[in-house]
Image (spheres, grey):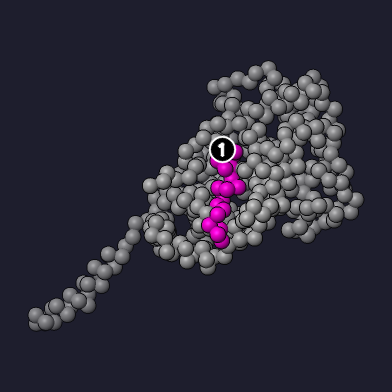
Amino acid sequence: MRLSSSQFYQYLLVIICPALVWACEVVSEPTPLQLPQPPDFLAMVVPADNPTTVEGVHLGRALFFDPILSVDSSVSCGTCHRPALAFTDGAAVSSGLNARLGRRSAPSLLNIGFHYKAVFWDGRSESLEDQALHPLSDTLEMGSDWSVVQQRLLQNDDYQQLFSAAFPQSGISRENTARALAQFQRTLISADSKYDRVQRGVAEFTPAEKRGWTIFFDAGYPQTPMAECNHCHMDPLFTNLGFANNGLDSSLTLLDFPDPGLGGFTKKRYDYGKFRVPTLRNIMVTAPYMHDGRMGNMPEVLEHYNTGGHYAENLDPNVRPLNLTNQDKADLLAFLQTLTDSTALTNPDYYPLPTK
C-alpha cells in the first residue's frame, strides 16, 4: 500500500518523533568510584542501592560542609566534624544551633565506612544512610525540617545540577541527600600512620614505641605488663565495633547511669551504660575523650584504665587495675602516637570543595 505525502508525515510524527524524544531524554549514568582497600582491612560493605560514584561523593562533600542543611543556615556537618581533628571538633560535647550544647562528643568519622555495625555512641543507626539525617532534625544540632531543606535545594541551581548528575533518575530528595552524605563519608579512609608503615615493613618503631606496642597487645608478658587494650581496640581499625561499659560511672542497678547509652536505645538492662568502642586511630588529635569528653588528655585516660574504673554489674571484664608504672604509660603513649595519620588529616579531598 502506497502512502500519500500527508500520511507519510503523520507516520513520521507517530512513529519516529517519539523515538527522537526518548533519545533526547537519555541521561548519563554516574561514574562508578572504586574506593581504596587498605591491607588487612575488612572489605567495606556498600549498600546495593547506594553504590559509590564520583558524582555522588562530590555532592555529599558539598552538602557535608554546607550550613544549608540547618534551620538558620549556621551549622553544617563539618562544624562538628573537622578534617584536621580526624573529623571531631575538639570540644567535650558538640554545640549546634545558637551554641546549644549536646550531650555527647563528636566521634571521629575516619574509616567510618568500615563500621558495618551500628553507628552513633548509642548504636541507634544501622547504616550511614540512616545516620546521615539524624543531626538534620535534632534540635540540639541542625534543628531543621526536610521540607525547608528541600525547598532551599530546589531553589539552588548548583544543587539541582549536582543532584541530577549524582542521581539522574530521581534528583533532589531526602533519601538521595542521605545517600550522598554516606558516599562522601565512605571515602574518609585513614591507613597511612607510622603504625601502618611499620606493618608494611617500610618503617620501624623506636624502642619506646615497640615496648608500648607489646603492652598494648599483651605481647610481652611477663617481661612487660598486660594492658588489655587490644581486646576492645583491635587492629586494624583499633575498635571491635562493639559496645562496652568501660567503668566511667558506678551503678548498682544499671538503670541510674547519667547517660543510658546503648540501653537507652535497646531498653535492655545489661546495655545501660554501654557506649560504642571508639577507634584509637588518630586518637592523639581527638581530645577530649570519652562519649562526654570528661577526660581532657590521654594520660588521664590511661590513669582511668590503670585504676580499673568504677563498678557496675556489666563492667567490661577487661577493665581492671593494671598496675602500670609511669614508664609503662609513657611507652603506651609513644605507641598511640604512631596511630596518627597525617596523610588523612591533611588530605585535600576531605576538606570543603574549593570556592568558585
Nearest the eye: 43 or 28: 28
Specify the quadrant that holds the N terminus: bottom left
Q: Can I make out residue 214 in this image?
A: no
Q: Residue furthest top?
A: 207
Which image quadrant is residue 23 in?
bottom left
Q: Residue at x 57, y 65 (%)?
A: 145
Q: Residue at x 81, y 43 (%)?
A: 248
What segment carries the magenta color?
Answer: 70-87
- Residue 84 is inside the magenta segment: yes
Q: Examine the rendered structure and indicate whether residue 15 appears above or below residue 161.
A: below
Q: Is residue 287 left or right of residue 356?
A: right
Q: Residue furthest right?
A: 252
- Residue 234, image x and y in percent? 68, 36
Q: Which residue position holds label 1?
A: 84
Q: Examine the rendered structure and indicate whether residue 242 appears above or below residue 145.
A: above
Q: Main secondary structure of the magenta part?
A: loop
Q: Is residue 258 left or right of residue 350?
A: right
- Residue 205, image x and y in percent? 63, 20
Q: Examine the rendered structure and indicate whether residue 158 appears above or below residue 191.
A: below
Nearest the eye: 234 or 296: 296
Q: Amino acid at mark 1?
A: Ala
Q: Circle 1 sits in a helix, a strand or a loop, which is it?
A: helix
Q: Residue at x 57, y 43 (%)?
A: 82
Q: Can I make out residue 86 in this image?
A: yes
